[in-house]
Image: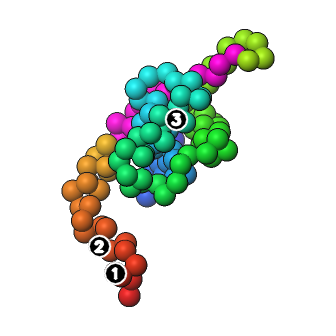
Amino acid sequence: MNNRDVPYRQGVHDAMAVLRGRWTVAVLAALALGERQYKDLKSSINDIEERVGWVSHTRPLTDRVLSDTLRRAQQDGLIERHAEPGRFGGVWYTLTPMGRSLLRAVRPLAEWAQKYHDELASRHTPEAAP
């Protein structure tokens, strides 16, 4: 079976499964800037979220959530992990070609969401609920 045999809905489902998790896109976007150490990755993501006013998330990224997100992204083939030798060696993460490709594929979705931001926001507020 080749890629064209996968029905459209199944392809979307598969892509959304890879993007699962509230912090996945934030982690991938941070790694788009280049290889990062674990400790710098977390602070960078939280700094960005704080700067934009916690629009995407309501609280800071924790070590546990970052570790889980990195582990899933690594299992999905989106990132690679490199550990320096020794007990206190640094741990580095970088996007794989597949991870970079996913970020490029998500860009049109982000542009769509930006275009319809006001309409989407009005439908997802507590006052808009029926």
Q: Position of residue 3 (x, y in %)?
A: 45, 41
Front one among 30 and 112 = 30
Say which residue appears at 25% left-offset and 54% top-offset. 114
- Give the mark, 1 or 2, whose residue is nearer the N terminus: 2
The amino acid type found where label 1 is placed reads: Ala
Q: Position of residue 86 (x, y in %)?
A: 76, 12
Q: N-terminal of the two: label 2 or label 3?
A: 3
Mark sitting on residue 35: none
Packing grade of label 3 (10 A; few <14, some 14-19, many >=20) is some
Whole-angstrom CA distance, mark 3 to mark 1, is 35 Å
Say which of marks 3 and 1 sits in front: 3
**What residue appears at the point 42 percent right and 46 percent down from the top-left corner?**
50
Q: Which residues make up the magenta segment?
A: 89-106
Task: Determine the CA span between mark 2 and mark 3.
Answer: 31 Å
Q: Position of residue 22 (x, y in %)?
A: 52, 52
Q: Is residue 124 above or below residue 33?
A: below
The answer to whether the residue labelled 1 contacts the one labelled 2, judged by CB atoms less than 8 Å apart, is yes
- When asked about the image quadrant of residue 81, the answer is top right
Element marked by disc 3: helix
> In this figure, which residue is indicated by the disc labeled 1?
128
Disc number placed over residue 43 in the picture, else none: 3
Mark in front: 2 vs 3: 3
15 vs 52, left or right, is right
Residue at image mark 2:
122
Identified at 65% across, 19% down, the residue is 90
Q: In 3D space, how far apart are the residues under numbered discs 1 and 2 (Cα atoms)?
A: 6 Å
* Label whose residue precedes the other's in the sequence (3 or 1): 3
Q: Quadrant of residue 103?
A: top left
Res 118 seen here: yes
Residue closest to the eye, 12 or 16: 16
Residue extending furthest left?
A: 115
